[in-house]
Amino acid sequence: MDLSRREFTKFGCRIIIGAAAGATIVESIATLGVAQEESSNKEYDWNEHLWGYVVDTRKCIGCGRCANACKLENEVPFDEPVYRTWIERYRIVREGTEESVKIDSPDGGIKGFAEDIPAEEIKKAFYVPKICNHCDNPPCVQVCPVGATYKTEDGVILVDYNYCIGCRYCIQGCPYGARYFNNEKRTADKCTWCYHRITKGLLPACVQACPVGARKFGDLKDPESEINKILDKERINVLKADLGTKPKVYYVGLDREVR
Amino acid sequence: MQPHLKRAFIILVLVIIGFLFVRSFIVPESFGQYGWYRGDSVAELRDIPVGYAGSASCSGINNECHKTTYSIWVDSRHKTVNCETCHGPSEKHVIDTRVMPEPANDTREFCGLCHFKRAARPADFPQIDPETHGENLKCAYCHNPHKPWFL
């Protein structure tokens, strides 16, 4: 057998590509079997749901019980300034003829908001609860180098704590600042919409804790769900719509100052 | 075949086998099961235990444990305030009643998280001036936390 260098390279490349393709096919056939096996013995079917979230900023009283419940339910460190959900206070303050916007969120709102500006200087004030938007087009998932964060079939963005290498790209990548670094787990961490609760038919802890119904959670695939009724009736906005991230947290009564 | 080509082929094949061998150890079994992530992690996140049981676990549907408290609460102005918002997460207590939940916070500041006068609150939400209202007594001295108009 007489081979030129070109023929050798060609042949070699074919073998590599062929072997890789073969391995991938064999592997995908093997895992296909597993996927069917596993999902058939679970009562929760994620193909039947697409979760969504509505925040009515007109109702929020800024009590911070949502952020508190979230930390307790999800074991988010209490002594660190990290939050899966938090409340921001926006105050539009008159200073002579000038107007300025003051935004603060002391302790994420968990300990309430002290009044530190005289009432007569405040033109307008309101609270805005913030949470992971569980984008349909999530930038954080795109930047993960190891596949440790992902979008589930029911539309929730999760972090695989056993696979995350803690590189913090996703924390940088989130335009909403919804991710944080968990110093106890040494991984990135974020809101899961309480995935352990919603897959058992319960509400996320923050929604259950809200005393005024400013936070609503439900299934976008169910036409009868409460949030679909709100989306049909109210004027809806999302945060930073121009980024094209397609958030699934919808805001009612959002002021133009909110970013 | 020329011997130097033969050697090259053998090395190539060994490298491929070695790559696949090492890869099979490094990549977790369930990786790629649903997408470019570890499929098992979905079940792991689903199996995290629940902390908040929900007001319906205190009485009503499943049991009659806190029948009196529950029945005055359900038709009070506080019916939208969950038991566990004041009493803390109590799933462990629901499963085993010997595990008592933390005592409810009965300070003025706690009620004040919702009721102290704040400029950013919706004006129609009932708010009080902490300086003048209730003569610095605990709120429960006059209001029942389970039914605030039960003076």
Image (cartoon, coloured by chain):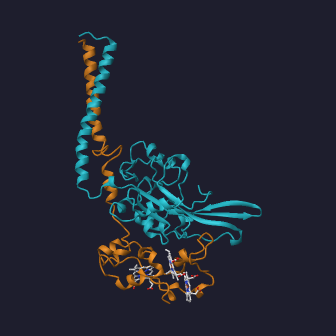
Note whether A89 is above or below A148 in the view shown.
below
Colour cyan belongs to chain = A
Left or right of residue A93, residue A211 in this image: left
Labels in figure, total: 0
Whether residue A88 is situated above or below residue B2 in the rendered picture: below
Chain identifier matching the orange colour in the rendered picture: B
Towards the viewer: B75 or A259: B75
Q: Residue at x 29, y 32 (%)?
A: B19
What percent of the width, then of the height, locates residue B41? 33, 52
Say if B134 sits above or below A188 in the image: below
Q: In which quarter of the image is residue A229?
A: bottom left
Residue A84 shows up from this direction: no
Q: Quadrant of residue A197?
A: bottom left
Please identify the quarter of the rendering in which residue B5 is found.
top left
Residue at point 29% right, 73% down?
B95
Residue B31's x, y, as percent? 31, 44
Q: Which residue is drawn at 52% across and 61% down?
A: A234
| Left or right side of A19 for B143 | right
